[in-house]
Structure formats: C-alpha cells, structure tokens
Image (spheres, rainbow, N blue to C red):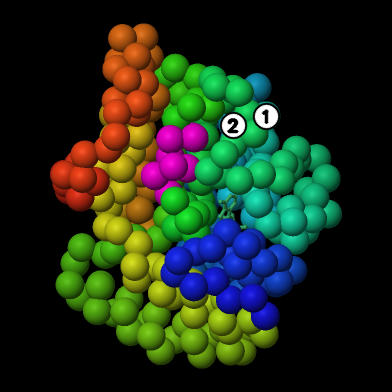
C-alpha cells in the first residue's frame, strides 16, 4: 500500500487515506476507546453554530465530523483531497455537500464562511501554516475557527501512559482491526512529531487569528484550539500587510502558553 512518511507528500497522504477509507471510522472508534464521539461533540459545541450559518469542514474524510456539524442546522461543506475518502463520504452522507480540494489552496472565495473547522486533519497537511492562512482567508470577518487535533498531555503521568499506549496497545489493536498497519504507524509517528499546544496557538496568531485559546480534552491527548478572524478592518489590513512581508524566523518558534477555562 501507499505509505505516507513524515515529509507528508500530498500524493502519499491522499493515497494512504484512499486505501483506509472503508474501515477508517470503525478503526478510529476502536483506537480512541469511544472518546472520538466526545471529541466531536466538544468540537461542535465550541463552534457554537446557528441554523443556516455556513461552515467549512476541512479534511472532512468520510464526513463523520461534517455529519455532527450538520445536526446543528448549519449549512455544511465538507472538503477533502482524498478521492477515496470523498467517495465514501458521498455514499454515506448523500445530503452533505462534498468538495474534492486541497486545504493548502481552498477552492472558495475570501469571506465565504461563518465558521471553519478541521478535525484530525491539520497534522496530515504538508504545510499546516499555509492551510491556516487559507482558513483565515475563507472566513468572514468575525468568523470562528475550531481545530480538533491530537496533542501532548502536559501531566508526566498521562504522557507516560499515552506513550505506552501508542507504542504497545495501538499497534496490537490495528493489527487486529485493520489490514493497513503502515497507515497507523504513520498515525503514531505523526502524533509524536506534531507540535505542542502553545506552538499551534502561535501558528494561529501568525496566520492572523485573534482571541486564540485552547482547551485540553482527555488530559491533553487531544486539544481543541479556537480563535476568531478579526472584525476590525484596520487589524485585517495589517494582517494582510504582514503576510506580504517575508516571515521572520523568530516568530515561528515562539511558544506562548494560553489556556481558557
Ligand atoms: C484522519 S482523517 C480525518 C477525517 C475527519 N475530519 C474526521 O474527523 O474523521 C484526515 C483527513 O485529512 C485529509 N487531508 C490530509 N491532507 C489534506 C489536504 N492537504 N487537503 C485536504 N484534505 C487533506 C485526508 O485525506 C484525510 O481524509
């Protein structure tokens, strides 16, 4: 099978997801010990969607995350670049609008959505900062973003238990439930190499978002980051100007801990 390495070449990542598409949700539910349902509920709650609002679910996969959003009465667009995941999603949820497209070059005009979300997707994108810039672009002024992603438990004991789970339990479970062990090895390595909460917060600020905050779920195994696109036209203009300037290397590694209640 196609195996994605941590250079996350888009064709490899897309090919890998094409192949796991039919069994993806079942294996995930098993691996998360049922917690994925709670993480999805927390994501939907954090978005605070109103009926009729337009929400974009980036890296929507088979549409499980998009389906949970649709239940709020919001108008959902589900985007993914894996043809296999999109085909599976259209089969399962014919009432959801699926779009095949790349998170790094979203096929929508600026200011198209009231809210944008991405669940367990940003870690797989080759250039997550570029994708954050795109999500900023397609949001209306004042629009909300919520990112649900695996993260790093701050408590040493939880961290140690989680490392043990990733190293010993997950390979055993995937060997039983999935024929695509390589894909889950990639999952494990990509979780390990994903930056911690404060770094993702800083990336979001660098993309232009304001009111950036995060909340740890399940002890920090998952983190929910949320923010807003600035409403003030002067702030938006200065973000645009900053984007045109080459990035200073010092800003990408600054880690500012911010946490909401
Ligand atoms: C782990 S799945 C998550 C699916 C869904 N959001 C969920 O919560 O179940 C990650 C998805 O990210 C998609 N993906 C990775 N890189 C992408 C990119 N650059 N553009 C669009 N989708 C991407 C993959 O095709 C895959 O379907």
Residue 42 image offset from top left, x and y in percent: 45, 47
Residue 51 at x, y percent in the picture: 63, 24
Element class at badge 1:
strand
Report the residue at 44% width, 69% height from top: 6
Can you give x and y, in whole percent of width and height, for residue 78 in the image?
66, 42
Question: Is residue 133 magenta-colored?
Answer: yes
* Quadrant that contains the C terminus: top left
Query: Residue, x 25% and y 50% (percent of image)?
Result: 199
Q: Tell me how far mark 2 sits from mark 1, CA to CA.
A: 6 Å
User: Which residue has dot 1 on it?
Assistant: 75
Which residue position holds label 2? Answer: 55
Would you say residue 6 is visible in this rendering?
yes
Residue located at (44% from left, 17% from top): 141
Residue 120 lies left or right of residue 196; in this view the side is: right
Q: Does the magenta segment cover residue 23?
A: no
Rendered-image quarter of ligand 1: bottom right
Question: Compared with residue 188, is residue 256 higher up or lower down, i.e. above or below?
Answer: above
- Say if 124 sits above or below 253 in the image: below
Magenta segment range?
128-135
Identify whether 98 is placed above or below 237.
Answer: below
Q: Which quadrant: the N terminus?
A: bottom right
- Depicted 177 relative to depicted 55: above or below: below
The answer as to whether callout 1 falls within 8 Å of ligand 1 is no
Q: Is residue 214 visible?
A: no
**Which one is in front, 47 or 61?**
61
Assess disc 2: are there few (<14), some (14-19) or many (≥20) residues with their C-alpha within 10 Å of its C-alpha.
Answer: many
């Amino acid at each position: 099978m196609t195996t994605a390495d941590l250079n996350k070449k888009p064709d490899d990542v897309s090919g890998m997801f094409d192949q796991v598409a039919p069994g993806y949700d079942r294996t995930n539910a098993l691996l998360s010990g049922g917690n994925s349902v709670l993480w999805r509920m927390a994501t939907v709650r954090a978005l605070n969607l109103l009926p009729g609002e337009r929400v974009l679910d980036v890296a929507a996969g088979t549409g499980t995350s998009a389906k949970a959003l649709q239940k709020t009465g919001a108008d959902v667009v589900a985007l993914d670049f894996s043809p296999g995941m999109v085909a599976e999603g259209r089969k399962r949820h014919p009432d959801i609008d699926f779009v095949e497209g790349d998170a790094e070059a979203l096929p929508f005009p600026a200011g198209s959505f009231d809210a944008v979300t991405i669940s367990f997707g940003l870690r797989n994108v080759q250039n997550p900062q570029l994708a954050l810039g795109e999500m900023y672009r397609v949001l209306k002024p004042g629009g909300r973003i919520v990112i649900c992603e695996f993260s790093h438990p701050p408590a040493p004991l939880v961290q140690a238990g989680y490392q043990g789970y990733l190293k010993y339990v997950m390979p055993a479970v995937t060997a039983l439930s999935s024929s695509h062990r390589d894909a889950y090895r990639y999952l494990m390595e990509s979780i390990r190499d994903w930056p911690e909460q404060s770094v993702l917060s800083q990336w979001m600020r660098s993309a232009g978002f304001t009111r950036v905050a995060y909340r740890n779920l399940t002890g920090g195994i998952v983190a929910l980051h949320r923010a807003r696109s600035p409403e003030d036209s002067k702030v938006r203009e200065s973000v645009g100007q900053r984007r045109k300037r080459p990035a200073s290397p010092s800003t990408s590694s600054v880690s500012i801990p911010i946490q909401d209640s």
